[in-house]
Amino acid sequence: ENLRCYSSEDLIGVEIGGALKNVFAIAAGAVTGAGLGASAQAAMVTRGFVELRRIGAAFGAKAETLMGLSGLGDLLLTCSSAQSRNFAYGLALGQG
């Protein structure tokens, strides 16, 4: 009763979202690690999402997929969580 699964036939969109969020999480961690502030962090994630949509469109991903849980939802979590290995890696890079 506490688990809800969502399915998607847009495999390209799910795969692109899952792959690129890791790259953006490293960048987000680096921004945080360098102490550039919340505005820089928000700008980086926002611009990352724009690029995610552009790349997704070029490969035929559906915009709804990229704006959903497997796209934007996963991006926001991965770019802000210390539990994310990629964010933690970027954080270490940003701290030098």
Image (spheres, helix red, strand yellow):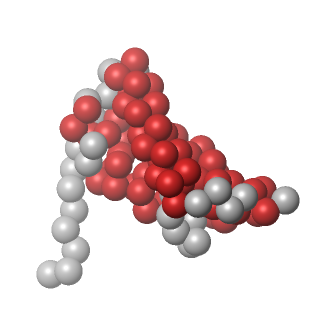
| Residue toward you, 69 or 3 | 69
Q: Residue furthest left?
A: 1
Judge whether residue 48 can be spotted in this image. Answer: yes
Q: Height in image: 31 above or below 71?
A: below
Q: Nearer the viewer, residue 80 or 40?
A: 40
Q: Which residue lies furthest to the right in this view?
A: 96
Q: In the image, what residue occupies the spot 27% across and 43% down?
A: 67
Q: Position of residue 48 (x, y in %)?
A: 48, 39
Q: Where is residue 54 in the image (x, y as percent from the top left)?
A: 40, 25
Q: In which quarter of the image is residue 10?
A: top left
Instruction: Name the spot of residue 27 as percent of width and height, x first.
Output: 63, 48
Dividing the picture into quadrants, the one containing residue 64 is top left
The answer to whether 22 appears left or right of 45 in the picture is right
Q: In which quarter of the image is the C terminus?
A: bottom right
**Residue 70 placement, left or right of 28:** left
Q: Where in the figure is residue 38, as x and y percent of width and height?
A: 52, 60
Q: Which residue is drawn at 43% across and 43% down?
A: 46
Residue at the top extreme, as displayed: 58
**Point 59% across, 44% down: residue:** 23
Q: In which quarter of the image is the N terminus?
A: bottom left
- State the count of labels: 0
Q: In this view, does 15 lie to the left or right of 63?
A: right
> In terms of depth relative to the viewer, which is nearer, 63 or 29?
29
Residue 21 visible in the picture: no
**Which of the 4 image quadrants contains residue 56?**
top left
Q: Residue pushed farthest bottom?
A: 1
